Amino acid sequence: MRPRIMAATLTGLLVVLCGLLGYCSVRPPDYHDFRVAAETTAQAAHDALLTADLTGGAVREGRAPKPFATVLLDDSAKSLASSVADFAELPPPDEAATALRDRLLPLLTAAVAKLQDAAADPERTGGLRDLAERLTS
């Protein structure tokens, strides 16, 4: 009798645990989740822009070879473009999140475009630091 009760209890706990995990994996994002995704994407863009600015300065001063900088900036632009696309696909849960997305998405798109321009010519990295600062304000 006792092993059956233990088995039934463990089976019940397992079913509850699977249900909770299933709920957590499919629940729609709320404003907090959306804001965290927005901040993560904006921080990635900020870091990529500052790295590109430093890389461009190193190329201009002869401290980094141009082919290295081109590959670094191209990879950075592709990575950021992927992050921005993932963020753009998130459905905003309310009006506040929609306003946040509408304010942030043009800056993120401009960051990707600037990084792609910098990858084409690493010596042209002007304006990256200004755009990075606008992302954090």
Image (tube, rainbow, N blue to C red):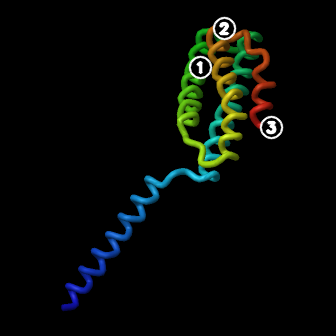
The Cα–Cα distance between marks 1 and 2, rounded to whole angstroms, is 12 Å
Q: Amino acid at mark 3?
A: Ser
Give the Cα separation between the discs numbered 3 and 1.
26 Å
How far across and down, in percent of the image, does residue 34 sit? 61, 46
Q: Find disc 2 in the rendering and name its residue.
A: 121
**Quarter-wise, where is residue 83 in the image?**
top right
The mark nearer the N terminus, 2 or 3, is 2
Q: Secondary structure at mark 1?
A: helix
Dot 2, crowdedness within 10 Å: few (<14), some or many (≥20)?
some
Tell me which amino acid carries mark 1.
Leu
> 102 left or right of 74?
right
Crowd rating for badge 3 (residues with CA inside 10 Å; few <14, some 14–19, many 20+): few
Q: Which residue is mark 3?
A: 137
The residue to which callout 1 is attached is 72
Disc 2 marks which amino acid?
Answer: Asp
Residue at the spot 64% in from the left edge and 10% down from the top edge = 65
Q: Quick check: marks 1 and 2 in contact, CB under 8 Å? A: no
Residue at left offset 60%, top offset 43%? 92
